[in-house]
Image: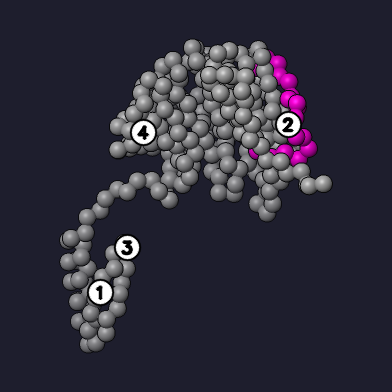
Amino acid sequence: MCRKISVLGIIVSVSLLLTSPLVVAQEQASVDEDLLKIFEYRNIGPTKQGGRIADIAVPLDQPYTFYIAAATGGLWKTTNNGTTFEPVFDNQGSYSIGDIAVAPSDSNIVWVGTGEASNARSTYWGDGVYKSTDGGKTWQNMGLKESHHIGRIVIHPQNPDIVYVAAMGHLFSFNEERGLYKTEAGGATWDKVLYINDKVGVIDVVMNPQDPDVLLAAAYDKQRFPWHFEAAGPESAVYKSRDGGKTWKRLGGGLPDGKIGRIGLDIFAKEPNVIYVALENANPRP
């Protein structure tokens, strides 16, 4: 009798002798040993083990260097335009990454926000934000550990000590460590500059590169339960600050209100008056 057996994706044909169980076992062991002698293991990269790709960051002055953040696979770095990658975050407290940011004024300064911000039942939480000053060789946890899920990090274009962090907070419960945080001390201290309430986080933030005091932030009103997901709410909105986060104004001007879900923001660097907003309009059709 001839049967096909799959061994690590390789299909082999093995003749099974219709004799005693001992002979069959000896013959099978011989086949397995011969197969393993010619089989070579190789690393094929973080595929399903790493999960979704959450973010990509490229230093402005190093176009062949970039960082890849995986939903549950840590942080990877290439210096040869993606020919090879190396893991640079394996010894830290979380494998789940929400966002990466490289300082525009110093490419050695890299920030990582742990905890993917997809807000699905398969989303894993993190333990705050990390900072590297040597291009990812070493890391230091800079706090915000109960933020759990980081949506975005932006760094001042001239002063790398000024950093904003959009935090979603706990996924399945309410907590106050959510909103938009700002540091002017490289992460040594933090101020919560935009806070709606204990169930509404901030999912995105963008900065005007020509006027860094001008920011837009996206609040996200959602509730996740093990059995149900409220993907939208009335507190999801776009906010604007003209003074570095001291004061904020909720924007309308044609943006829908009511039951709004996740909002994504982007700003056109050459013409910062051009803003792009992608939002989930969950209002029922009239």
Q: CA distance from mark 3 to mark 2?
A: 51 Å
How much space separates mark 2 and mark 1, taking CA atoms?
A: 63 Å
Asked if labels 1 and 2 touch by Cβ distance under 8 angstroms, the answer is no
Q: Kindly state the secondary structure of the residue where label 2 is placed.
A: loop
Mark number, residue 77: 4
Give, as a three-letter code, the residue at label 1. Answer: Ser
Compare residues 21 and 87 and report the one nearer the observer: 87
Residue 174 placement (x, y as % from top left): 69, 38
10 Å neighbourhood of mark 2: few (<14), some, or many (≥20)?
few
Chain-order first, disc 4 or disc 3: 3
Residue hosting label 3: 9
Q: Is residue 178 above or below residue 30?
A: above
Overall secondary structure of the magenta section: loop
Q: Amino acid at mark 2?
A: Leu
Residue 262 visible, this angle:
yes
CA gap, disc 4 to disc 3?
29 Å
Tell me where residue 153 appears, x and y as whole percent.
Answer: 54, 26
The numbered dot on residue 159 is none
Question: Which stretch did the figure color magenta?
Answer: 245-262
Report the disc number at residue 13: 1
Q: Tag 2 or tag 4, which sits nearer the N-term? A: 4
Q: Nearer the viewer, residue 42 or 132?
A: 42
Q: CA distance from mark 1 to mark 4?
A: 41 Å
Q: Disc 1 versus disc 3: distance between alpha carbons?
A: 13 Å
Q: In the picture provided, is 12 more to the left or to the right than 271?
A: left
Determine if the magenta segment contains residue 210: no
Name the residue at 38% across, 46% down: 46
